[in-house]
Image (cartoon, helix red, strand yellow):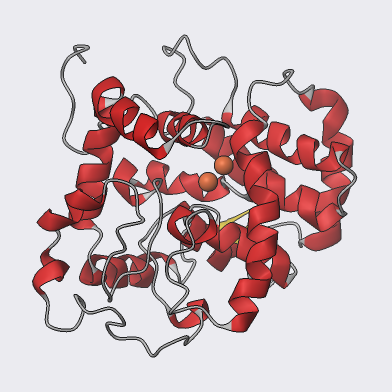
Amino acid sequence: MAANAIPVNAPLKDIDEWDDFLTGRYQEGKSQEEFRQYDEKATPGVAEFYRLNHQYQTFDYVMAKEKEYFGLNKGIKSIWEAAEFLNTLVDDSDPDTDLTQIEHLLQTSEAIRADGHPRWFVLTGFIHDLGKVLCLWGEPQWGVVGDTFPVGCAYSDQIVFPEYFKANSDISHPVYSTKYGIYEPNCGLDKVHMSFGHDGYIYEVMKNYLPESALYMLRYHSFYAAHRHGAYRHLMNDHDVEMFEWVNKFNPYDLYSKGHTKPDFKSLKPYYDDLFAEFFPEKIAW
Ligand code: FE
Ligand code: FE
């Protein structure tokens, strides 16, 4: 593809460009204003990506995707098989990324392990982005990565690029456009449908195997409007607020563990073989 041709559904060079954007957005000492200026001018691909995301993540879209994927009918795979599958996403032509997807996962989990956290937390670091395999099943970038947010109620102005929601058909819907939409005040996030992406999907895959604290990390790690900016407290219950401490604990490892030394896959593999065997049967449904 010519360098200047941005395909409609794939404005990012690769999905890691979104992760890199997040790291820049939450760089220490950077003001909101600086992000804004940086965002639109320096990263037009990212801005276009959010434009599509905010336009097309409607309540009906989310319901259709939940129906398609939450039944876990894409076959059974071990954790390593899923990771190897995700690895096929790697873009060898990008000179900025010399790390494979598996190496990115290992950097996150190894940073958690180095800080002495429990084994389930290390495991969560490794699997948190395995939901990005959605890309390999033909889902567009804007339906796999990006900040997540509730649908079926008003979109918060705390979501990045809130102005792009003007093109979302739900903003003129009589119910979905209201503060609570289809939800009750403080109903709890478990009842709330989130925009579709790798977070909600990996939660569905993992929900029978991991402790609740891990499941919150998986399910809401891209819900920046809530865990970084305090939005949507009117839908959360006390239990959500309590469990979001885990989401906050996880977030720095997601954002800042990249770029450390390249993990030595061979020497680490036995540790992860044991870790996976502790929590999972040999293969699980995807
Ligand atoms: Fe992620
Ligand atoms: Fe991540």
Quadrant of the rendering where the C terminus is positioned = bottom right
Counting the numbered discs, the total is 0
Camera sees residue 90:
yes
Above or below for 276 versus 83: below
Q: Residue at x 43, y 79 (%)?
A: 234
Instruction: Name the quadrant containing residue 211.
Output: bottom right
Quadrant of the rendering where the N terminus is positioned = top left
Camera sees residue 140:
no
Q: Residue at x 64, y 21 (%)?
A: 259
Residue 102 % position (x, y) = 64, 32
Residue 51 % position (x, y) = 20, 44
Say whether residue 219 is left or right of residue 159. Answer: right
Residue 209 % position (x, y) = 72, 68
| Front residue (pair 86, 11) | 11
Say whether residue 86 is left or right of residue 117. Answer: left
Q: Residue at x 47, y 87 (%)?
A: 187
- View extreme (top): residue: 95
Say whether residue 41 is left or right of residue 67. Answer: left
